[in-house]
Amino acid sequence: MRMTDRLFVLALSSLIALAASPAAAQVLYMQDFQTDDTANWTVNDGPTDEHADFFFDYSSVGVPLAPNSASGSTRGMRLATNITDGIFGGFSVSPNGQSFTGDYVLKFDLWHNFLGADSSAAIPG
């Protein structure tokens, strides 16, 4: 099966944090993905096929330890889109029950990988 644009994004983080800015540095939200927190996230679907995994062990696909990982853990959020449809698109995820206004800073570790049009690597959906 020929696959056109595939995008594999890991927001690998042992922490995703939103902090008020500039000097206040009060943490508004933090997630370290060390427990399966899937039920506490909303997937905002896009126009194509996508997959979100909120408890992904990224060492299972050869990704090295994230620089800010908690206690050497290899768990993080995995987002994949354009898996088989070949339609350029995307999607987003949002933590349930959160609303942020004003200026803030988002910090996370990211591994970004483009698998290519003829890649045979499988992404579970």
Image (cartoon, rainbow, N blue to C red):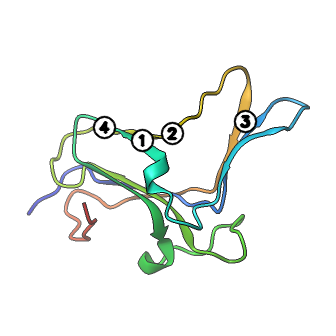
Q: Earlier in the sequence, mark 2 or mark 1?
A: 1
Residue for badge 1: 42
Element under disc 4: loop
* 39 relative to 44, above or below: below
Residue shown at 65%/63% (left/top)?
14
- Distance from disc 3 to disc 4, alpha carbons, whole Å, reads 24 Å
The residue carrying mark 2 is 96
Q: Position of residue 47 (x, y in %)?
A: 23, 34
Residue identifier under label 4: 45
Q: On the image, which quarter does residue 53 sit in?
A: bottom left
Q: Can residue 17 be seen in this view?
A: no
- Front residue (pair 123, 121): 123
Question: Which one is closest to the eye, mark 1 or mark 3?
Answer: 1
Nearer the observer: mark 3 or 2; the answer is: 2
User: What separation in Å lies between label 2 and label 4 (alpha carbons)?
Assistant: 15 Å
- Left-right relation of 115 to 22: left
> Hey, which residue is sitting farthest top in the picture?
102
The structure residue drawn at horizontal position 64% and vertical position 27%, both measured from the top left corner, is 100
CA–CA distance in space, label 4 to label 1: 9 Å
Q: What element carries label 3?
A: strand
| Mark 4 vs 1: CB contact within 8 A | no
Disc number for residue 105: 3
Label 3 vs label 2: CA separation?
19 Å
Residues under numbered marks 2 and 1 in contact, where contact means CB atoms less than 8 Å apart: yes
Residue 20, horizontal then vertical, whole percent: 79, 32
Residue 60 shows in the view: yes
